[in-house]
Image (cartoon, grey):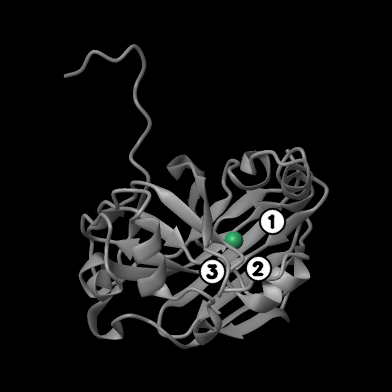
Amino acid sequence: MNNYVFPPAAVPSLPIVGSDKRFAVNRIFCVGRNYHAHAVEMGRPVDKATMKPFYFTKTPSTLVESGATVPYPCGTINYHNEMELVVAIGAEGFRLAESDAARMVWGYAAGLDMTRRDLQLVARDQGRPWDLGKDFEKSAICTAIVPVGELGILDKGNINLTVNGATKQNADLSQLIWNIPELLADLSQFYHLQPGDLIYTGTPEGVGPVKPGDCINGHIAGVGDVALTVGEPE
Ligand code: MN
C-alpha cells in the first residue's frame, strides 16, 4: 500500500554470478581520467603528485544489463565506448582509510561508461557540468556482479574492448592512476558510501566513436565480459 500518485520506478539492479538474488543499485559514481594514456588522449594529462581524482555521477536509472541493444542516443554525432572495471560496494563507509577497502568491496563487474563525447567536450570546455555528455538514458552498461571472494582487492589484470572484433582498448588494471583503496578513501571524504553503490573506475586509452550496428565486447580478466550492440537512432 502506498500513497504515490503514479507507480514508482523499479529499483535498478544487476544479476549476481552464482546466485538467484540481485544486487540493488543505489548510486553510480564514475572516476574521470584514471589511466595516464587516456588522460593524454583527452588532452588533459594527470600529475598524481599535484592532482586529486575527480568524479561524476550517472543516475541509477541509466543502468542497462550487458547483452542489450541500445538505440544510438539522441543529441550526439560522437557516441563513444569507455571500458571500465566496476566496483560494487557492500558496506557503509565514510572517511575511510585505504586499509578499509577489503570490507567495502562486495564484488566487481565489467562496465561501459558510454559517452556523448561531443556534448561532454562542449560542457568541459565551457566549464559546464558533464551531465548531457555522461548522464543520459541507457548510458551505464554493466555485467552481473562477481562476488569478491578470493579476487580480493584487484590491482592487476587485463582490461580490453573490441568493436566488431577489432581491438580498440587493451590495458591492465595495474595502470589505474588511483587504485581501488585510494579511490574508496578519497570518494568517502565527500560521500557516505552505501551498499549498492557502484564505482566505474575509469577507462584506458582507445575510446572512440561507435555507430549503429556495431557490436562492442569488453573483457576484464577474472571479472567478466560485457557486450553491447548499438541500435538505430530513435
Ligand atoms: Mn569513464
Amino acid type, mark 1? Val
Residue 211, percent across and down? Answer: 79, 58
Assign a secondary structure to mark 1: strand
Assign a secondary structure to mark 2: strand
Crowding at label 1, few (<14), some or many (≥20) Cα neighbours within 10 Å? some
Q: CA distance from mark 2 to mark 1?
A: 8 Å
Q: CA distance from mark 3 to mark 1?
A: 18 Å
Residue 144 seen from this side = no
Residue 124, percent across and down? Answer: 72, 47
Camera-nearest residue between 211 and 41: 41
Q: Earlier in the sequence, mark 3 or mark 2?
A: 3
Report the residue marked by disc 3: 84
User: Where is the C terminus found, in terms of image quarters?
Assistant: top right
Report the residue marked by disc 2: 216
Amino acid type, mark 3? Glu
Q: CA distance from mark 3 to mark 2?
A: 13 Å
Camera-nearest residue between 197 and 41: 41
Q: Earlier in the sequence, mark 2 or mark 1?
A: 2
Q: Residue at x 63, y 56 (%)?
A: 114
* Above or below: residue 190 compared with residue 208: above
Q: Earlier in the sequence, mark 3 or mark 1?
A: 3
Q: Residue at x 23, y 13 (%)?
A: 3
Indicate left or right for 120 with 10 as reference. right
Amino acid type, mark 2? Ile
Image-quarter location of ligand 1: bottom right
Report the residue marked by disc 1: 230
User: Where is the N terminus found, in terms of image quarters?
Assistant: top left
Q: Are marks 2 and 1 in contact (CB under 8 Å)?
A: yes
